[in-house]
Amino acid sequence: MTDNIGLYIHIPFCLSKCGYCDFYSFVPDEGTMNRYLDALLKRTDEYSAVINCPVDTIYIGGGTPSVFGGERISHLIEKIRSCFSVTPDCEITVECNPSSVDEKLVKALREAGANRISMGIQSAVTSERKSLGRLSDSQQAKQAVELFRANGFENISLDLMLGLENQTIDTLDESLDFILSLDTKHVSAYLLKLEEGTPLFEKRNSLSLPDEDAVCELYLHTVKRLRENGIFQYEISNFARPGFESRHNLKYWNDEEYLGLGPSAHSFLDGKRFYFERDFDGFLNGKKPKDDGFGGGEEEYIMLRLRLTNGVRFDEFQKRFGKAFPDSIIKEAKNLMKYEVITLDKSGIRLTENGFLLSNSVIAELLF
Ligand code: SF4
């Protein structure tokens, strides 16, 4: 087991279901949320008996944790603190949606020790938000950010979405201007993916989505505008002011261990991967998680680390695996350099901005 561990708690509740969303979530009632809290408290107890290293990041995600409410989240954080050794500087992130943020929630989260907020905005353009089925408007998002800030939250991350219906560089600039005006410390910018089974997927033939070249342009424009404003890319989809990179999410990309609780939550513990199925009643009734094989091998490590702008450092690889970085991969990287998708030097290997756009193919080319 690693020195410190991250804890992910999945809250599978939302006020309504967005048209593009494939996350495991549904609209709950109070009784359902209370029963879920009980189940989470029980699982926290169970796992604290087998994990004996400190917890240095807690990420409460979803779904929409803000729908779960400040009181239940505080109760949960309190339980985690009583069961695990939570480090004094633990990063505690709570995902929120502007439509379910009010003063009571913000104050409760602050009191519970949450110190990082991740908020879904996706777009500041009303028509784009509507096409995604988002409930709140940009004014609500602004008020929510101001409320968090007034209550001492400095570390706020906002989500932006690229590749939306009718999105252009101009409308993207509108969203970027909005996000930058809120002085956020962190931005996650995801490409819209049409997931099978979602309402947006069903409508796919009638949507006027930007083509592949236009999406690349939107992505590179985002990277550039954020960089010009002091928010630097550190992962394919993530950008931060220096020192505000998500410590919890870095555990995933550094192939470090974490425990995930809740239906659909994944874990990596003691070299093994497992997950709780998308089965709410099963989780309530104590159903065991499903094995997902072994993790932490060389290929997995390289694949995950190449998502980071730092890429794979050869000295770190040597330290982790007790051997030199494979020559065969260096040889392949040299071949790919002519396409300007990879940078290779004495210290390591990493993808370029163009490489990030083709990350799946480049990584597959390197490893398989
Ligand atoms: S709020 Fe987030 S988790 Fe909930 S339906 Fe919308 S995108 Fe999915």
Image (tube, rainbow, N blue to C red):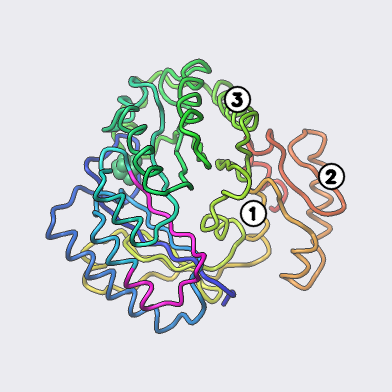
Farthest residue, direction right: 346
Would you identify the image quadrant in which residue 76 lies? bottom left
Residue 29 visible in the current orientation: yes
Query: Which amino acid type corresponds to the residue marked 1 in the rendered image?
Result: Met
Q: Residues within 10 Å of mark 1 (few under 14, many from 20)?
A: many
Q: Which residue carries the number 1 mark?
A: 303
- Report the side of 80 relative to 32 (left or right): right
Q: In the picture shown, does residue 199 fall above or below 110?
A: above
Magenta-tinted stretch: 78-96
Q: Which residue carries the number 2 mark?
A: 334
Q: Which residue carries the number 3 mark?
A: 221
Q: Nearer the viewer, residue 312 or 93?
A: 93
As measured in the structure, the alpha-carbon distance from the residue carrying label 2 to the one carrying label 3 is: 28 Å
Answer with mark 2 or mark 1, whichever residue precedes in sequence: 1
Q: In the picture shown, does residue 159 fall above or below 34?
A: above
> Which labelled disc corresponds to residue 25?
none
Is there a contact, CB below 8 Å, between mark 2 and mark 1? no
Q: Position of residue 52 (x, y in %)?
A: 49, 82
| SS of the residue under disc 1 | helix
- Magenta stretch: residue 278 in it? no
Q: Nearer the viewer, mark 3 or mark 1?
A: 3
Query: Which amino acid type corresponds to the residue marked 3 in the rendered image?
Result: His
- Report the side of 69 relative to 254 (left or right): left
As measured in the structure, the alpha-carbon distance from the residue carrying label 2 to the one carrying label 1 is: 17 Å
| SS of the residue under disc 3 | helix
Would you identify the image quadrant in which residue 347 lies? bottom right
Q: Position of residue 309 (x, y in %)?
A: 68, 45
Q: Residue at x 43, y 48 (%)?
A: 153
Q: Residue at x 55, y 70 (%)?
A: 294
Q: Is mark 2 within 8 Å of ligand 1?
A: no
